[in-house]
Amino acid sequence: MLVAFVNWARNQSGTPAEVRTPVSVEDVVHAVRDAAASARRVRMVGTGHSFTGVALTDGIMLRPGGLTGIRSCSDDRVTVLAGTPLRVLNELLDERGLALSNMGDITDQTVAGAIQTGTHGTGRDSGGLADQVVELELVLADGSVATLAPGEDLFDAARVGLGALGILTAVTFRVEPAFLLHHRRRRLTLGEILGSLDELTSANEHLDFFWLPHTDACLVKTNNRNPGPARPPGAFRHWLDNVFLENTVFGAACAVGGRFPDLVPRINAVSAAALADSEAVDVSYKVFTARRDVRFLEMEYAVPRERLAQALRETRDLVERMDWKITFPVEVRVTPPSDAWLSTAYGRPSAYVACHIYRPTPNPAYFEGVEDIMTRLDGRPHWGKLHTRDAAYLGKVYPRFADFLALRDRLDPRRLFTNDHLDLVLG
C-alpha cells in the first residue's frame, strides 16, 4: 500500500510510485540503481520540516527511519547515519560528554535533511550545521558510493546540496567537549535593538530576538559559554515558559486571532506585557533547542548583516502600512560566513529575518511583501522555507551557483534526483 507523504506544516504532500525504508548503504545503492533502470526518480525524505516541496518525488521515496545511530565516535568527530534525528544525536553525544558547537532550535529533523537544506542556528563565530561537517558519504546517480572531505569541490557543493547531487547516507560532524551556556531572556524595544545591533552581535556568542508586530516589544535571547556550575530552570519554570506560555497559550492566542483578526494587535500587546526577564545556565543542546507545537508557515531570508536594520525597519513599516494582522513574531538571527557553496551565508556575515503565519490563516501577501524587501537587499531564501525565487534570481546571489549546476550536470545528467521544486530553483 502506497503511503502519501505529508510535511509537518501540512502544506506539502505527494504520493510516490514506491516507498522503501533502507537499513544500509547497500539498500540505498540498490534503490538508486533500480530507479535508473526503470527511468524513475528517487529522493530520500527527512521528517518533513521543510515548508517547500524539496522532499517530494513521484518515483521511489526512501524513508530515513532505518538509517539511524552513531557509526563511529572519537574525541573530536562523530559519524552518524543520515536518518538520525538531531534530538537523538544530541542525547547520544551528551552520553559521551560531547556536543555540537551550534545548532538550530528544531530537533525533529534528520541530520541529512537539516544540512541539505542549510539549517542554521545563530552564532557570532560558529556557523550552521553544514559548517560543522568534516566528511560526507553520498550515493551518486551511477550507484557508486563517494566519501567526500574538505578540499574537494564536491564536498563544498554537497554539504548544502538539496539532495540534488546524490543521496546522503552518513555525515561526520566536528564535535567538542560538552559545555554549558548562560541563557538570558530580556525585553527590549525594537528601537533599542536597531540602535545597538552591532554591539549586541559582537558582545554575545549567540543572539536571537523576536519582534512582536503591532508593538515595539522584542524578546531578546542571548547565549554565552559559562564555566558553571549549571543552574537549569526549575521544572515549573521550564514548563511555564516552554510549554504553557510559548505553546499552549500562544496557540490559543493564534486561534483567537485567526477567528477575530481585529483583536490581533490587542493580543500582541498583552503578549508583550507578559514578557519577563529570566536567566539560566544549562547544557548547550537544551539551551539551543525549543519546543514548537503550534503549526505555522514560514519564510526566511538571509541578508548581508550590515543591511539587517534596514530590512527590519522596512518590514515593520510594511506591516503597519498594509494593516495586516500578524500574530507570530518576526525572528532574527545571525551567522558568520560559510564556504558551503549553497549556504545562505556563503561568503558573507549574514542576518536572518524569519516571518511566520499561523497555519490555518495563511497570508500570501505578507510573505510576498517581505520577499520584495529582502530581494532588494540581495537576500537569499532559506532552502527549506517558502519563497518564490527561481534559478535566474538565485544565480545572481550565489557566486558558486553556476559551479554547482555544472557539477550536477556531470554527476546526474539524467536528473535521477530531481523533482518539480528543484526544477524551479536549480533550473
Image: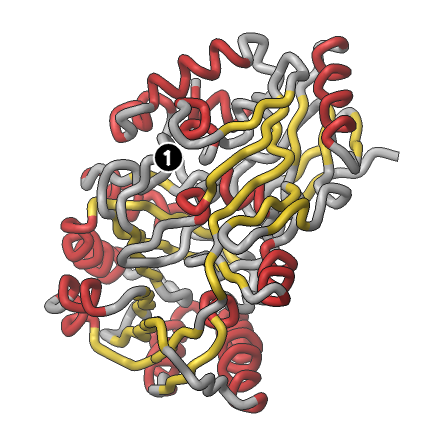
List the single residue furthest toward the left.
195
Image point 31% across, 24% down: which residue?
400
| Residue 293, horizontal then vertical, whole percent | 59, 67
Q: Is residue 116 visible?
A: yes
Report the residue marked by disc 1.
340
On-image quarter of the C terminus: top left
Q: Is residue 289 above or below residue 311?
A: below
Q: Is residue 289 above or below residue 160?
A: below
Q: Is residue 304 left or right of residue 413?
A: left
Q: What crowding class fits label 1: few (fewer than 14 Cα within 10 Å), some (14-19), or many (20 or more)?
A: many
On-image quarter of the N terminus: top right
Q: Is residue 419 above or below residue 383?
A: above
| Residue 296, horizontal then vertical, whole percent | 51, 57
| Residue 153, horizontal then vertical, whole percent | 40, 22
| Residue 203, horizontal then vertical, whole percent | 20, 69
Image point 41% across, 51% down: which residue?
120
Image point 34% across, 86% down: which residue?
277
